Amino acid sequence: MTAAGPARTAALLMWLRPLGYGLVAAFILFDVGVRLLGSGLRLSGWLLFAAAAVMVCAEAWRVFLVRRAHRGPDPEPVEVAPPVAGRWRALNGPADGAPSHGTRAYGQAYAIDITADPEDRPGPAFGWWPPVRRNGDFPAFGEPVLAVADATVVRVRDGRRDHLSRNSWPALPLFFAEAFVRDAAGPAFLLGNHLVLDLGDGTYALYAHLMRGSLTVREGERVRAGQTVARVGNTGNSTEPHLHFQLMSTADPFTARGLPFRWRGIGVPADGETFTA
């Protein structure tokens, strides 16, 4: 497969997957609706079967592409500067094993989530009440996000709203339902507002769940290590304001292989570990 092959395949899959899921959902809702209304109108079972076949084939194709991208031994970790400053806590990181987020899809094999943990302002704990909170209740919201190396900006996606938190037991069902819909719709819906930097030598850094309107760089722009490029938000598939960070082999997470990282002076913090950058 040529270099352009995976990109064309990814573009086709990102069109087929939501189409298949959308058609199946629409046909089922239509059938339920006409039955509740007592109408004699019915959809052919072949239509539902065809839509389901598109969905299943697209999923199988995606699994094949993910496995193909991750063939061979794991590469050596790439050392970069930390993407934040101050006191933070790590979650869902690769120090305790990969894939850190339970999947290698979207280049997430060695991804990490981090949330601000200042000593003078602890964040709200996960619990039963209140079901949702405003983002300002979390110390990570609005914190600067930094370039981890001298790099070129290759992707900027902004405009998605910062939603309320989902860090409670009552909100978890909503979060999982949203996650299913976002995954079916494609990586942009999972990542929310995000940024990709080209670090050179086939290494790309992705920052996800960024605050709407906070991205300060444009595609094609050169940035310096330590430069503020955005702020932490709560967009996309996120339970609370935090930064999702990963390195990957291409600028497109749909076709990327996840790459291991080390933060200079810190290493790779374990789940629940507090670190200072």
Image: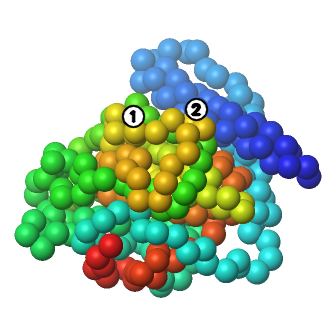
> How is the rendered protein coloured?
rainbow
Nearest the eye: 98 or 119: 119
Numbered label attached to residue 160: 1
Position above or below: 18 against 90: above
Q: Residue at x 75, y 36 (%)?
A: 12
In the image, residue 78 lies at what x, y percent?
60, 74
Image-based side of 138 in relation to 185, left or right: left
Position above or below: 129 against 8: below
In the image, residue 146 lies at what x, y percent?
40, 56
Disc 2 residue type (three-letter): Gly
Quarter occupied by residue 15? top right
Quarter occupied by residue 28? top right
Residue 190 shows up from this direction: no
In three-dimensional space, the C-alpha distance between marks 1 and 2, rounded to whole angstroms, equals: 21 Å
In the image, residue 90 lies at what x, y percent?
35, 73
Image-based side of 149 in relation to 61, left or right: left
Residue 19 shows up from this direction: yes
Q: What residue is pinned by disc 2?
A: 22
Report helix, strand or loop for mark 1: loop
Report helix, strand or loop for mark 2: helix
Residue mark closest to the camera, 1 vs 2: 1
Local crowd size for mark 1, using a 10 Å CA cut-off: few (<14), some (14–19), many (≥20): some
Disc 1 residue type (three-letter): Arg
Q: Residue at x 20, y 47 (%)?
A: 135
Image-based side of 160 in relation to 172, left or right: right
Nearest the eye: 16 or 138: 138
Image-based side of 96 in relation to 67, left or right: left
Quarter of the figure with the C terminus? bottom left
Nearest the eye: 229 or 44: 229
